[in-house]
Image (cartoon, rainbow, N blue to C red):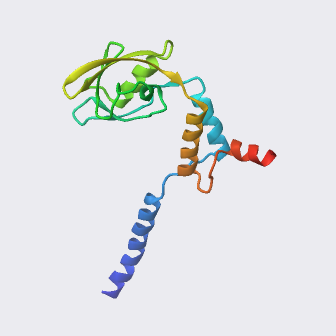
Amino acid sequence: MISRILRSIPVALLFVALAVQAEEPKKCSATARECEQEIRRMLAGRRYLGLQVVELPHGGIIVKTVNDDGPAGRIKDEFMAGDRIIGINGRDMTLATAKEFKQALADAKETGVLFVILQRRGAYRKVNTKLEPYPKAQIDKIIEQHLLKNHSGTQQPPSQTTASNQK
């Protein structure tokens, strides 16, 4: 009986160690400075709409949040949380995934012009808008969120730290 208990202790410790390791958030393998540079490179010249969407279980996407500072947020009362996206630039989005939504936005990057068909409370509406380049403040916010989540102890982007140290 005691030998059985002694044999089960290492197994229990192994499970505890695996559980603790699984709970740890994955950290970025790059340095904070490398991450900042890569995020800036990726977002340079890219355009955004300022919507966060979620997929419906039976297909389709709805607006989760509207970024007030983004192009979608500056058009008052056109985009609202809960709106279902029916189409973008003539492309059917009724059963689309978030990935297909992002692809529709990427396909419009040349002109940046979008016409979006929304469904709100059973009524349809057409919204004309444009994609806009990420502003510096938005890029800084994205970088800050990444650093806080993936690089413990880093409070602000390294370029800001370097700039403040040089004053």
Query: Which residue extends farthest bottom?
Result: 2
Instruction: Measuring from the top left, give residue 96's x and y in whole percent.
Output: 30, 26
The picture quadrant where one finds residue 60 is top left
Please tell me whether residue 52 is drawn above or below residue 123 in the rendered image: below
Q: What residue appears at the point 41 percent right and 69 percent down from the top-left corner?
A: 16
> In the rendered image, is residue 31 in sight?
no
Q: What residue appears at the point 55 percent right and 28 percent down from the top-left corner?
A: 134
Please tell me whether residue 122 is drawn above or below residue 1 in the rendered image: above
Instruction: Measuring from the top left, give residue 40's x and y in whole percent.
Output: 62, 33
Q: What residue appears at the point 25 percent right and 23 percent down from the top-left corner?
A: 94
Residue placed most toward the observer, 59 or 19: 59
Q: What residue appears at the point 62 percent right and 41 percent down from the top-left corner?
A: 35
Indicate the quadrant containing the N terminus: top left, top right, bottom left or bottom right: bottom left
The picture quadrant where one finds residue 120 is top left
Instruction: Measuring from the top left, give residue 66's x and y in whole percent.
Output: 40, 33
> In the rendered image, is residue 137 in sight?
yes
Query: Which residue extends farthest right?
Result: 166
Instruction: Measuring from the top left, give residue 148's x and y in whole percent.
Output: 56, 50
* Left or right: residue 138 compared with residue 51: right
Please tell me whether residue 115 is drawn above or below residue 6 in the rendered image: above
Indicate the quadrant containing the C terminus: top left, top right, bottom left or bottom right: top right
Residue placed most toward the observer, 75 or 24: 75
Please tell me whether residue 132 is drawn above or below residue 164 in the rendered image: above
Query: Which residue extends farthest left?
Result: 122
